[in-house]
Image (spheres, helix red, strand yellow):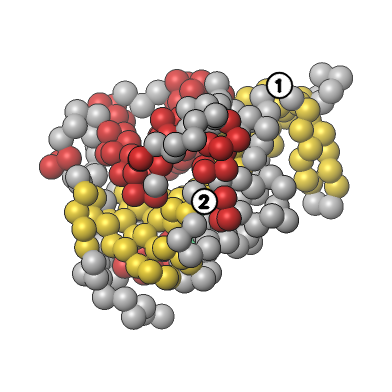
Amino acid sequence: MTSDFRFNHNAVPFHGFCCYRFETLGSTQDLLKEWVSQGLAKPGTVVLAEGQTSGRGRPGHIWESLQGKGLWMSVYFQPCIPVEWAFGWNMRLALAVCKVLDALVPSVPWQIKWPNDWVTYQGRKVGGMLVENQLKGSCITDSLVGIGINVDEDAVNSSLPYATSLRGEWKRSTLAEQEPNDFRKEGLLQALLAEFEFMMNPGGDSSKGFNFAVNNPITGGWNIEKIIGDVESRLYGLGQRLPFQCGDRTEYWITLGLDQGGGLRVRSESGELQQTLIHPHYRLAYTLNLS
Ligand code: BTN
């Protein structure tokens, strides 16, 4: 289905990005996907909506996106990286967002909940990420990164005990009456895009666009051990006994860390058993293999 939204509706450049804002959309991810498939979007295209009527979480989940209550956005990257780096790519994105959360609400030790959520130390989720990659041969050519962050307290459905918002966490964790100015959605957006730009072009030259090749410092210096170490240093539940759903059964495992393929390394309480859990949602959500 072709959307009613004209591609050049409300385009606003920001550094190397071009932001398209909408009052309400079904899903920013779906619109961006449509533009990419039609060859309309270039890397750095950002689709934002004040509200979404059919926001998507990871497969099988809806993402509640109340009007004006959070940051609902999708960003188009062309990472051009080998498919084996999919997990590293995911983690780099997750770390970049964490850095921004750290800066906005420094009183909260923000953590990454495997595989793609941002949570407080207690596991309250402030946002999540949906990464949908497209392949050409064994290369990830296109990556559509959907990010949802609850900003206002009433973004969060009160029946979800483990959901939270930036503003809620700010209030909970600080005595300051005044919120920082850049706490608004606009500040959050600009901080995120600046961080992504730095991630893609550490040298700071956005004129090179968002393609990067293996001889670029970011991928040439791709160090999966370092990325994993950085994520593990803020991995939710590390060393703790956590419940995992396995079909209709709950199993308890102690989290040991991540493996290079994106699995979660765990052990039984006695230590007798060790295994790597593969998240059913941690996969390339859709692939377009052009060769
Ligand atoms: C998750 O936690 O399951 C991922 C949530 C991703 C939600 C964002 S909101 C913007 C973008 N558009 C969507 O439909 N989903 C993502």
Q: In this view, does 256 lie to the left or right of 90?
A: right
Label 1 environment density (alpha carbons within 10 Å; few <14, some 14–19, many ≥20): some
As rendered, which of 127 and 226 lies closer to the eye? 127
As rendered, which of 122 and 133 lies closer to the eye? 122
Tell me the kind of residue under disc 2. Answer: Asp
Tell me the kind of residue under disc 1. Answer: Gly
Q: Is residue 96 left or right of residue 41?
A: right
User: Which x, y percent locates residue 79?
Assistant: 32, 44
Residue appearing at x 58%, y 55% in the figure = 154
Q: Which mark is in front, 2 or 1?
A: 2
Residue appearing at x 52%, y 51% in the figure = 152
As rendered, which of 45 and 169 lies closer to the eye? 169
User: Which x, y percent locates residue 272?
Assistant: 84, 20
Tag shown at residue 158: none
* Residue 204 visible within the image: yes
Residue appearing at x 28%, y 62% in the figure = 20
Q: Earlier in the sequence, mark 2 or mark 1?
A: 2
* Image quarter (top left, top right, bottom left or bottom right) of the C terminus: bottom left
Above or below, 95 relative to 75: above
Residue appearing at x 36%, y 78% in the figure = 3
Label 2 environment density (alpha carbons within 10 Å; few <14, some 14–19, many ≥20): many
Secondary structure type for disc 2? loop
Q: In this view, does 57 lie to the left or right of 196?
A: right
The residue pinned by badge 1 equals 239
Secondary structure type for disc 1? loop
User: Which x, y percent locates residue 170?
Assistant: 53, 36
The residue pinned by badge 2 equals 152
